[in-house]
Image: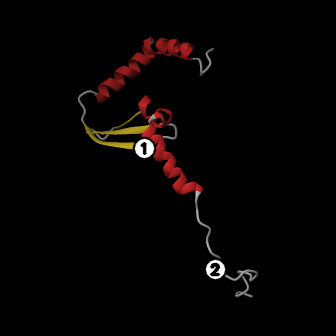
Amino acid sequence: MTRAGDRVKDASTLERVMSCLAAQLKFQSLQAMLEGRRIKKVEFTNETQFVGIWLHLDNKEVVVVSMAELSLTMLLRDPDVARQEQDLYYKTHVYRPTRRRRHKKGASANAKET
């Protein structure tokens, strides 16, 4: 059995999977579904660890695609993306001015109700 983090073993396992008949049938089915179709709409979604690409085809099928360069790790390697993400983080999470109290200190919020 292979460990998930072992790239050499993962690559050779995937190579064997890709060459087996059951996988080949899946690939052919997918190929038949996609060939000759047109993309009507493209959407980008947050899939937690990568940006998902949703391709809406002319036959109303939707195909979700992931690309290595749209993984969170790869996106954050771009200095502009990393800097802008950090700026957004600090703007929304780090500095928040405190709110003023609406009632006098020591007065109970329920005092009017009793």
Q: Nearer the viewer, residue 59 or 57?
A: 57
Nearer mark to the viewer, of 2 and 1: 2
* Quarter holding residue 9: top right
Q: Which of the two discs, 2 and 1, labels the residue nearer the N terminus?
A: 1
Looking at the picture, does residue 47 appear above or below residue 11? below
Q: Does 71 sit left or right of 94 as displayed?
A: left
Q: How many marks?
A: 2
Q: Secondary structure at mark 2?
A: loop
Looking at the picture, does residue 7 appear above or below residue 97? above
Q: Quadrant of the C terminus?
A: bottom right
- Amino acid tagged 2: Arg
Residue 72, image x, y percentages: 49, 36
Q: Nearer the viewer, residue 68 or 78?
A: 78
Residue 53, image x, y percentages: 38, 38
Q: Secondary structure at mark 1?
A: strand
Q: Which residue is mark 2?
A: 102
Residue 62, image x, y percentages: 35, 38
Q: Quadrant of the N terminus?
A: top right
Q: Which residue is mark 1?
A: 45
- Amino acid tagged 1: Thr
Query: Residue at image x 53%, y 50%?
Result: 89
